[in-house]
Amino acid sequence: MENRVIWLASYPKSGNTWFRSFITALRKGEVDINQMATQGIYSAKGLWEEILDTDFDDLTLREAEAYRRLAMGYSYLGEVTPRFLKVHDAYTYSPWGGKPIVADVPGNFAIYLVRNPLDVVLSFANHNKQSVDQTIDQFICNESAGFVKSTRSWSQSYQRLGTWSLHAESWMFQQQIPIKALRYEDMKAHSIKAFSGALEAAGLHYSADQVQQALDLVQFEKLQEQEAKKGFHEKPYPSMKFFNKGQSGRWKQELSVQQIQRIMQCNEKMMRYFGYWGEAKQYLIERHQWVGPVDDFIK
């Protein structure tokens, strides 16, 4: 069956908006960051309120979960063109009946966009107007972390995140939706191969020339320029820059040894899985700041 729903899943600040801009460029031949050619975010209340003609502010969390799954079923009936839906929720299960929070519909496929948590924390701190230490405590290393505690004051519903590692593990090891991981670092360093590989895994076929043309339209500097000229409706604070720096490896200049160690301590499993552990460990060893056994070397 052709994929009808392609989830763009990620921990926040991991390249999701860049990838959605890329899809927009492929589909439209141009990019307006305020008019993406994707279908919004799974947690958006307005997306489901329109389908069900229901005010989600009047619902309990239990009802909202059930209604969101119901709306997904209606939304994709008879779809022919694949639809992309952003999701920041971890792949968890409802305490009411045990069904997945992320709706299971025929033709599911997921692209999991992942980025080194040592860089995520810097971008996320800017996004939330927090210090790095606050972001480590409240998000990157917090098993209970989540977005949007009070749905009445936001356009989105609650999203369970967990630690960076728990979030990644929840998506990569679930068995319901076929999934392809896409590392932000590969998107930067090997763009055509990385983006093309994600498209092919999702059953979408574009030529190398089409991919390159789309990538040319979504260069980070061009997205920054659009934001500076027209703003970006997805950013939480008008004064902050959503497209801030977009670099890999900033953590080596901007994080303290103690901050690096804290992030590594609570995210070891998936940092190893995605190949981030070794670089961070080598960095600490070279500065004589590695606190683990020497023979527990880069894996």
Image: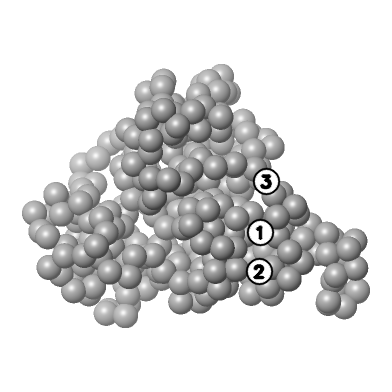
Residue at 53%, 20% in the rendered image:
213
* Residue position marked by numbered label 1 in the rendering: 118
* Quadrant, the N terminus: top left
Q: Are marks 2 and 3 in contact (CB under 8 Å)?
A: no
Kindly check if marks 2 and 1 are in contact, taking CB atoms under 8 A apart as contact: yes
Confirm or deny contact between disc 3 and disc 1 (CB under 8 A). no
Helix, strand or loop at label 2? It is: helix
Q: Nearer the viewer, residue 152 or 51?
A: 152
- Residue 232 in view: yes
Secondary structure of the residue carrying tag 1 is helix
Q: Which mark is residue 263?
A: 2
N-terminal label among 2 and 1? 1
- Where is residue 66? Give x, y as percent: 21, 68
Residue that carries the numbered disc 3 in the rendered image: 248
**Rendering quarter of residue 191:** top right
Look at label 3 and name its amino acid.
Ser
Gap in angstroms between the C-alphas marked 2 and 3: 16 Å
